[in-house]
Amino acid sequence: MDPVVVDPTPPVIPPSFKWQSLLPVVALVLILPAIVAGVKIRQLIAPKATSGGTVATVRINPGQIITLPRASPIPMSALAFDAADQPIDSGLTYTWGMSSTNSIGTIKIDATNTKLAIFYPDPNNIGQGDIFVQAFGSAGTASGSIPVFVGITPPTPFPTPVATPGPTPTPTPLTQLPDLVSPGIPTPSGVPMVNQPVRITFQMTNIGGSPANPAEYAYTSQADGSSTLLATNTCTANTVLNYGQSCVSDYSFIFPTAGQKTLNVKLDPNNRVVEANENNNVYSVTFNVLPGPTPTPRPKPTPTTTIFPSAVPTPKPSAFPTPTPTTNFPPVFLTSDLPNGSIWTTYLTTISGYDQNPGDILTMHLVQAPLGSKLTGCTQSVTGYKQISCSYKWFPYWNGTYSVTVAILDNQGSSVTRTYSLLIL
């Protein structure tokens, strides 16, 4: 038997395994996916609109409206932006309004969110206008607007920007049938007065897709006025209007009496043209004809008594002065200018005038003024020179310079008119 060799080195026993040493690594492995997921979710969330800036502009979507009278309602939305072009989503109230040439539609604001509204085109009227929105609140006030075209195309096309200039697109008609319209109502030029000629003109345009032949019109009511054709008239019985073409009606009218007059015009009065819209052919205008100036009477000379000599002295008759007719002076304006106003703010000012004749009774009227404005609360003095004062009130929706023509009349037939310039900022 061979001898057994024994290794004198003691055997190495591995230390016992401790799980506590792996706890930091396990925690990191468990937490790391949650951190990565949180970062990704944060990246996917769109930044919310700020509400801390000052309102600078208001934008409306869509940027313009082109539609037909019987088209479906069009939803709209508005949003305010600050000077850094960041949206302001809270703390603001939005008000909507509209101005147009022919009552082309109405606006209904959402009952729970004033940023939303719906435009309803009028089923019978065509024309153009502006829809505007004002945002106001603790962040300030600003407004914006978009153009609206109902039944007509924009006078200037809106080309799409391209890298290289291209031809300007030609407007296309909204229908293949002819359609005669008047972009504006018949308008007097100047202040109409009794027995004084006043020029009344309007434009007739074919917005349809085929010629209007013949393009006719007629005054269906001239009140009590008589008319004379002017040389500048271009609408005749033989006029033919292609798409986009216009002619001008130009007459001189004379009215024998004062008061309110209404003139009515009908396009295609005999229905000789089949049109795309037969409900937009009647137009009217209402205005006041003022009394003409009253000539001032000249006083009659007082006759003198001639005394002839005689043998018996004749006593000199007592001289009784001949009464001189009272001169009727026309009224005079005391107000020289109108103060400036602001949009979306009630405009209120006082217009005054007087008359040198103590017994006269004065009245004040608007001859020509912005739509919706009026004179209210007129008062006049009862002793001395007659003075009249009236409040001129209006709620302007848009800025610009407007003309306000006012007349003061007395009960003796004299009158005076004055045109003021009103600046709305």
Image: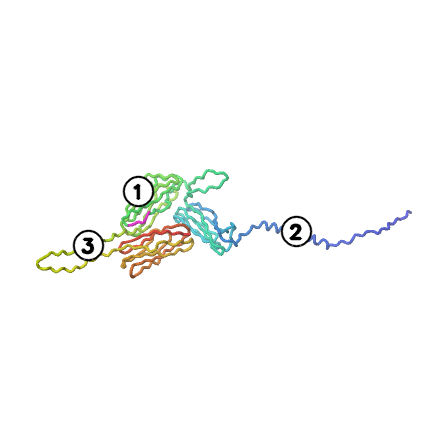
Does the segment drawn in magenta span residue 363?
Answer: no
| Pick the front one: 139 or 39 | 139
Most extreme residue toward the bottom is 383
Q: Quadrant of residue 336?
A: bottom left
Q: Nearer the viewer, mark 2 or mark 3?
A: 3
Is 205 positioned to the left or the right of 227 in the image? right
Tell me the element at label 2.
Answer: helix
Which amino acid type is marked by label 2? Leu
Residue ID at (46%, 38%): 167
The residue wearing badge 2 is 32
Tally of numbered tags: 3
In whole angstroms, how far apart are the C-alphas of marks 1 and 3? 46 Å
Q: Which of marks 2 and 3 is nearer the N terminus?
A: 2
Is 72 positioned to the left or the right of 191 in the image? right
Q: What stretch is highlighted in magenta?
A: 189-193
Answer yes or no: do the residues labelled 2 and 3 have beta carbons within 8 Å?
A: no
Q: Which of marks 1 and 3 is in front?
A: 3
Q: Which of marks 1 and 3 is nearer the N terminus?
A: 1
The numbered dot on residue 88 is none
The residue wearing badge 1 is 230
Residue ID at (31%, 60%): 381
Answer yes or no: do the residues labelled 1 and 3 have beta carbons within 8 Å?
A: no
The residue wearing badge 3 is 301
Which amino acid type is marked by label 3? Pro
